[in-house]
């Protein structure tokens, strides 16, 4: 895993620029994975639609197998995205800790020396470990390294929570129309941004 190759470089000198480049690499990989997932989902929908219009049992069986393959691929992509989300959270948290320490070179070494690679890999790849649980563990490690809590760390990985909540309400039927959902999402995001501006003043 490329991310752990990056972490294993902790025995050498790493710069803040190295950390920033890794953040960019992970962001690109996340975008590429999302594009692949969207392609799979579109293909799966097309297969299902085609199967619903065809009456031949043998043709339907073949399409059903294809649908199953695409579904498995989509689930793999979903798991990959979950891991990427945790990796991005990790690298952003390391960057925040470095910015706080001011001494970039010494900071990277000190922070990464405290990362248990085996434990971190287990947390990253465990589907049962939520983003919130992972962030809590990461926060405890980096707060110790940084000699105090890191401001803003608790918000990492939670971007878009307001929109996620609106979608959930739409799924459950609490919000019936797309327009109402969009309006609520916009309002919630504006409210969060307003709170952030007030806290920074």
Image: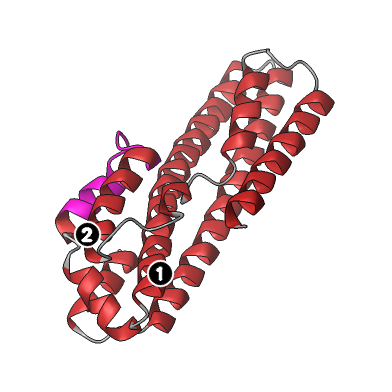
Compute the Cα span from label 2 to label 1: 15 Å
At a point 63% along the width and 44% down the height, the residue shown is 195
In the rendered image, which quarter contains the N terminus? bottom left
At a point 60% along the width and 22% down the height, the residue shown is 60
Q: Residue furthest right?
A: 179
Residue 39 position within the rendered picture, expressed as x and y whole percent measured from the top left: 63, 47
At a point 66% along the width and 23% down the height, the residue shown is 51
Q: Is mark 2 on a helix, strand or loop?
A: helix
Q: Residue 13 carries which label?
A: none
At a point 39% along the width and 64% down the height, the residue shown is 91
In the figure, is residue 175 to the left or right of 18?
right
Looking at the image, what colour scheme do you see? secondary structure
* Residue 91, above or below 192: below
* Most frequent secondary structure within the magenta stretch: helix
**What is the magenta range?**
119-131
The residue nearer to you, when weighing 74 against 93, is: 93
Q: Is mark 1 on a helix, strand or loop?
A: helix
In the rendered image, which quarter contains the C terminus? bottom right
Residue 94 position within the rendered picture, expressed as x and y whole percent measured from the top left: 35, 66
Residue 153: image quadrant is bottom left
Question: To which residue does mark 2 refer?
Answer: 144
Residue 58: image quadrant is top right
Residue 117 position within the rendered picture, expressed as x and y whole percent measured from the top left: 18, 60
Q: Is residue 29 magenta?
A: no
The residue nearer to you, when weighing 59 against 132, is: 132
Question: To which residue does mark 1 refer?
Answer: 95
Q: Residues within 10 Å of mark 1 (few under 14, many from 20)?
A: many
- Number of numbered labels in the structure image: 2
The residue nearer to you, when weighing 140 against 11, is: 140
Residue 78 position within the rendered picture, expressed as x and y whole percent measured from the top left: 46, 42
Q: Which of marks 2 and 1 is in front?
A: 2
Q: Residues within 10 Å of mark 2 (few under 14, many from 20)?
A: few
């Amino acid at each position: 895993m490329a991310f752990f190759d990056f972490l294993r470089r902790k025995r050498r000198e790493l710069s803040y620029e190295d950390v920033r480049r890794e953040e960019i690499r992970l962001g690109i990989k996340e975008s590429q994975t999302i594009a692949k997932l969207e392609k799979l989902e579109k293909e799966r929908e097309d297969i299902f639609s085609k199967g619903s219009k065809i009456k031949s049992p043998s043709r339907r069986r073949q399409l059903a197998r294809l649908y199953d393959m695409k579904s498995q691929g989509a689930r793999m992509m979903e798991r990959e995205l979950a891991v990427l989300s945790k990796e991005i959270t990790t690298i952003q948290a390391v960057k925040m800790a470095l910015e706080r320490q001011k001494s970039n070179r010494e900071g990277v070494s000190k922070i990464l020396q405290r990362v248990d690679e085996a434990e971190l890999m287990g947390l990253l790849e465990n589907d049962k470990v939520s983003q919130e649980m992972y962030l809590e563990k990461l926060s405890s490690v980096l707060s110790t390294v940084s000699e105090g809590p890191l401001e803003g760390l608790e918000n990492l990985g939670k971007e878009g929570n307001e929109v996620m909540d609106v979608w959930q309400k739409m799924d459950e039927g609490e919000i019936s129309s797309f327009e109402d959902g969009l309006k609520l999402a916009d309002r919630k995001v504006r409210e969060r941004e307003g709170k952030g501006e007030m806290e920074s003043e």
